[in-house]
Image (cartoon, rainbow, N blue to C red):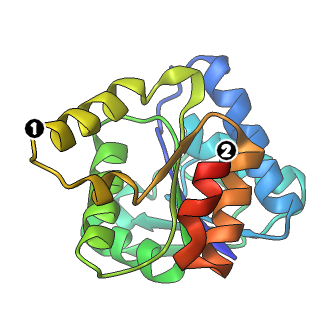
Amino acid sequence: MNICLYGASSNAIAKSYINPTEELGAKIAERGHTLIYGGGAAGLMGAAARGAYSQGGKIIGIVPSFLNVDGILFDNCDEMIFTETMRERKQLMEEKSDAFIVTPGGVGTFDEFFEILTLKQLGRHSKPIAVFNINGYFDSLVEQLKNAVHKQFMNPESFELCFFTDNADKLINYLEYAVKEPEQAKIYKDLK
């Protein structure tokens, strides 16, 4: 399975976020999955790539050409695909992936999360989305989404289109289950 991972690119992130993401990358590779991500060497993107690389996993980086600057990109990708724009990058990541993981991040990560969630809500894809809620990073987002449902800006079914967990094994289990049995993915979430 090709798993797209979105996440922060900053080097200023605490080890309490870096270490679990590196472990997640390692688990993705151990289970025989390919990591598709933004190609960065730093932050949570770099952590996931280092983890996957440590276990001999296949890594595909997709990055706009303007970010091809010394020290920014992970040197050990099996394949590095360069695009002209960020928009093209996101489209290729979506097309090449069977599932999505969102790790903590800033504006770019939120943009990627909401775009992929919106496309799923609109029926443009049916691929599973899992959010890695390390250290409760996404707790306030969960509350905001619940608030949107409560105030009828979002239907309850839209909230069910992604899976939030702080456990890497549960996250990957969910993606594997949801890819095999997309109509039954809610059952797995209810069993957590």
- Which structural element holds mark 2? loop
Residue shown at 42% from the left, 74% from the top = 94
Task: Identify the image quadrant of the N terminus.
Answer: bottom right
Residue shown at 59% from the left, 50% from the top = 190
Q: Give the percent coordinates (x, y) of residue 33.
A: 76, 70
Q: Give the percent coordinates (x, y) of residue 112.
A: 34, 55
> How dense is the environment of label 2, judged by Cα within 10 Å: few (below 14), some, or many (20 and up)?
few
Between marks 2 and 1, how big is the CA–CA gap? 27 Å
Residue shown at 64% from the left, 58% from the top = 188
**In the image shown, does 119 or 28 lie closer to the viewer?**
119
Q: Describe residue 77's horizontal placement relative to residue 115 as left or right.
A: right
Residue shown at 85% from the left, 64% from the top = 31
Relative to 155, residue 137 above or below: above
For residue 179, which quarter of the picture?
A: bottom right
- Which structural element holds mark 1? loop
User: Looking at the image, is mark 2 or mark 1 earlier in the sequence?
Assistant: 1
Amino acid type indicated by mark 2: Lys
Q: Describe residue 153's horizontal placement relative to residue 16 as left or right.
A: left
Relative to 87, residue 112 above or below: above
Amino acid type indicated by mark 1: Lys
- Residue that badge 1 annotates: 151
Asked if one can make out residue 71 in the rendered structure from this viewpoint, the answer is: no
Q: Describe residue 69's horizontal placement relative to residue 26 as left or right.
A: left
> How dense is the environment of label 1, judged by Cα within 10 Å: few (below 14), some, or many (20 and up)?
few
- Say the numbered circle drawn on residue 69: none
Relative to 48, residue 135 above or below: above
Q: Give the percent coordinates (x, y) of residue 95.
A: 44, 82
Q: Give the percent coordinates (x, y) of residue 18.
A: 65, 29
For residue 98, which quarter of the picture?
A: bottom right
Asked if one can make out residue 158 in the rendered structure from this viewpoint, the answer is: yes
- Residue that badge 2 annotates: 192
Task: Identify the image quadrant of the C terminus.
Answer: top right
